[in-house]
Structure formats: structure tokens, C-alpha cells
Amino acid sequence: MAQALTDNFGRTFPYLRLSLTDVCNFSCDYCLPDGFKRCSSKPSFLSRQEIINLVDAFTELGTYKVRLTGGEPTLRRDFVEIVKAVANHPNVSQVALTTNGYRLEKQVQKWFLAGLTHLNVSVDTLDQQRFYQLTGHNKLASILKGIDKALELGFAKIKLNAVLLKGVNDQQLPQFLEYVKHKKVSVRFIELMQTGDNLTYFKKHHVANEVLYRQLEAGGWQPKIKASADGPAVEYYHSDYQGTLGFISPYSKDFCTGCNRLRVTSVGDLRLCLFGEQGVSLRPLLQRPEQQPQLISCIQEQLNYKASSHFLAVGDTGVTTNLSIIGG
């Protein structure tokens, strides 16, 4: 095995977030309010073999967790085959998916049998009408049934992602608490992040997660100890609840000190940070297995350019126009 991925700040990277497509069939207010619009030239997303070559290189560098993201990754016709290919890799122990849940109820068993181990589902609200207003789809009931199916199947971990929005869902903590009372899931509130095209929306709806976790602490909730592959989320537990609640707070102090993931876009660009300025195309080095030494060397070299932090606090969103481009 080559030397493990370590940057100039001593951070290691066992976690790869791999986007399979930037296409999404939802029109969430905070990401794609006008729905997905393809640019004039149709992109060619990474093939299954290119993905295998990429995963080979990252696992040589100590990566053992791969998350498949989008856009909406399950829109790819070969999604199940990609899951199988990644899950069958001898050095990958966690294969995760982030999905809007559109196909969850009908296909979650197929994904599980293909080797998916961890599941994140975007559920910004448990109110059916508000869910429709936010996403443009009346799918909440189906998504919740899909989550119940996933619980029965026995995924290693199931998370619900909720982007915290002032005036939309910031008063819905009681509903989420009731949901996790008897379900072994983790609801994670994600602070709304500014991107290149949402400044007006951000100013109107951004609210700090601190508002909610202070309420939890007052109710006897305690922070959990993190596992090695966990990200920067702070997760809380309570002995009276089967589920947990977590918070991803990108504007908090020292948020980036625990960074443990790298990102590759659906066309093969390595991104060192969700909101970074720099990236490099790995695709030319994904064509043949014998290119592995060059690919590994390229990935290692790029770690020299990873900054200590993003610069969201000063309004610098880097090259991220919206989150569907790189998978959040």
C-alpha cells in the first residue's frame, strides 16, 4: 500500500465522496429552485471501469469509505452495478449513498443486496405540504415508507439530512424528536450554505444550528464520541430515544479541522474542498490499470494544495455554483 493520504495540516482522508451525476429530478428551493438545467454540451459521466480504477487508487492510499452522491445518483441506469463494483472491492468496508429518496421505497432492497451499507436520505421536513413546496414532489409518504423498509433490511446506519431553513423548518424540532423516539435513525440538521447562485435565499433563510442544539442540551441530550470515518457532524443521543440528532455547522469555529474526505465530481475532477477554488482532472489517468502509480502520485501531490479551511465566513464560495455539481 502507498503512503496514506495526509495533508500539510496532519489530516488523513479515509473517506471519498464520489458524484455519479449532476442531474437531479428534484427542484429544492435551496439548491435547484428552477430544477436541473443541462448545459449545451451533454457531459460524459465516469464509466464503471473508470470508477473502479479510481477506487483502486484511493484504497491504496488508505480510503475505506466511499459515498455515492449526485445530483441524484440513483438516476444512473447502471447505479446498482456501480454499487456492486464498489462494494466488492476488498479494501472498501463502507459503501454509502446520499439520495433524495425518489426511488427509495421501490428499490432500497435491491441496493442493499448489491452491497450498500450506509444510507443518507434528504428529508428537510416531516410536513407533507412543506415537503412538496420545498422539493416540487409529493413524495414524503413514499420516502418515509422507504426508510422503514431500510430499517427492516438492517443497514449499518441510516441518516435523514435536513437543511435548516429559517421560517421553513427551524420550528420543527419537536416533530423530528418524535420521529427518532422509536426509530434507530440519525436526523442531521445541516446549516444552509451559501453557494454561487443563492445569496438572496441564503440571507433570508440562514440560521445557525446552535439554536437547535442548545434546546437539545437543555433537554438532557449528550454529544456522542466520533468514529474514525465520521465527518464533522456533532451527534447527540438521549437514553429515552432510539435515534439520534446531529448537526453539521460549516460556519462554526474549527469546523474544518476534522475534515476527513475528498471529493471527485461525476466527470472525474478531484476537489479538495466543497468550496475550494482548485481542482484537477483525474480522468486521463483512469483509463488503464497500469496508470495506477501516476494516479496515486497525482492524488498525493494535490494534497499539498488543500487549504486549512474554507472561506465561507467571508462569502467566498469557491467554484461551487450549487450543491448538485459536486454532491454536497
Image (spheres, rainbow, N blue to C red):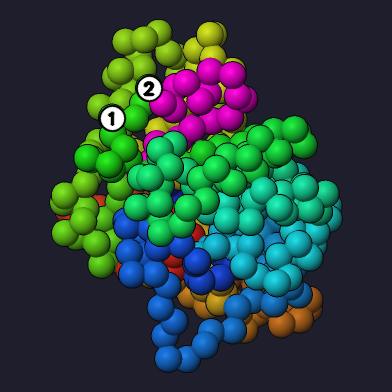
Q: Look at mark 1 in the image and give the residue it sits on.
A: 171
Q: Tell whether position 44 is magenta.
A: no
| Helix, strand or loop under label 2 | helix
The answer for how far apart the CA atoms under marks 2 and 1 are is 8 Å
Which sits in the foreground, 268 or 70? 70
89 relative to 77, above or below: above
Q: Position of residue 288 (x, y in %)?
A: 76, 81
Residue at x 32% of width, y 10% of height: 218
Q: Which x, y percent locates residue 113?
A: 83, 49
The mark found on residue 8 in the picture is none
Asked whether residue 253 appears in the rendered view, the answer is no
Tell me which amino acid carries mark 1: Gln
Quarter of the image with the N terminus is: bottom right
Is 80 on the left-hand or right-hand side of 19?
Answer: right
- Considering depth in this image, is 265 or 154 the residue closer to the camera? 154
**Residue 26 located left or right of residue 228:** left
Query: Does the magenta-highlighted stretch encompass residue 176?
Result: yes
> Residue 166, percent across and down?
23, 40
Taking the spot 60% from the left edge, 63% from the top edge, the residue there is 73
Front residue of 197/167: it is: 167
Q: To which residue does mark 2 refer?
A: 174
Tell me whether the residue at label 2 lies in contact with that at label 1, contact meaning CB atoms closer than 8 angstroms: no
